Amino acid sequence: TANKILLPTNIISVGDYAFYNLVVPTMLELQQVQSIGASAFEHLNSLQTLIIPSSVQSIGRRTFAYNISLTKVTNNSNYNSEKQVSEPILSDYMFTNCSSLVSYNSEGNEIYINEYHYQVDSENVKTLGRNVFAHCTSLDSISFNNKYVGPYMFLYCTNLKQLTISTTVETIDEGAFKKCSSLETITFAPNSTVKNIEALAFQETIIKELTLPESIDYLGEGVVKGCQYLE
């Protein structure tokens, strides 16, 4: 139909920029797709709901970026390595500037980050990229069940006001919450296991206090740079 893309089941690969900058659809069904190229569905300005099927094993950068009407994403993509690690994929800039996004892998209005890895050496898998949710300016709730928060992952998420770092998180990478200009409260869960907070992680937020857990081994340069209300 005019407001829906339904890919035939025999299509298993979508190339770079394949549907770039379409006015429609509001719905997208990927059926049996296994590989999605860079920017393949970028700038679909009317797309509201996205379900990524379990058949998907590879997603390029910026694949769904700048979909400004997108509110809900269910990501069932499935990265399988020789080590039999199986988890959804969040590639570089995957949802950047999806300014209406409020729900990711959640039944409610929440971004739920579950069991992602980010490693750059050939012995490990890489399923979590950088700037994944950058400039998602409607996002206001995040829940982690994950060891790692990626670089610049929530850059300029200007509606995020409160943040709780769960006991699962061990590393907060560079610029992860940089310029979240409404972020006023950061709480580390009791018995926190955070070991590393990299450079600029909380730069230019409006936090007034920050109590770090005893588990911290490393603080990067400028972690709270520009936090003018910090006492």
Image (spheres, grey):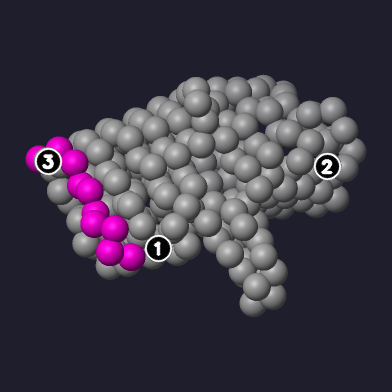
Among numbered discs 1 and 2, the one appearing first in the sequence: 1
Q: Amino acid at mark 1?
A: Gln
Residue ID for mark 1: 34
Secondary structure state at the residue bearing disc 2: loop
- Local packing at callout 3 (Cα closer than 10 Å; few below 14, some 14-19, many 20+) is few
Dot 3 or dot 1: first in sequence order is 3
Is 189 situated above or below 4?
A: above
Is 165 placed left or right of 35 in the picture? right
Asked whether the viewer can see residue 181, the reply is no
Alpha-carbon span between mark 1 and mark 2: 36 Å
Q: Nearer the viewer, residue 94 or 7?
A: 7
Q: Main secondary structure of the magenta part?
A: loop
Q: Nearer the viewer, mark 3 or mark 2?
A: 3
Say which residue appears at 83% left-offset and 36% top-offset. 192
At x 45% / y 64%, what residue is drawn?
58
x%, y% of residue 151?
57, 53
Residue designated by label 3: 1
The amino acid type of the residue labelled 3 equals Thr
Is 189 a magenta residue? Answer: no
Mark 3: secondary structure: loop
Q: Which residue is mark 2?
A: 193
In whole angstroms, how far apart are the C-alphas of marks 3 and 2? 50 Å
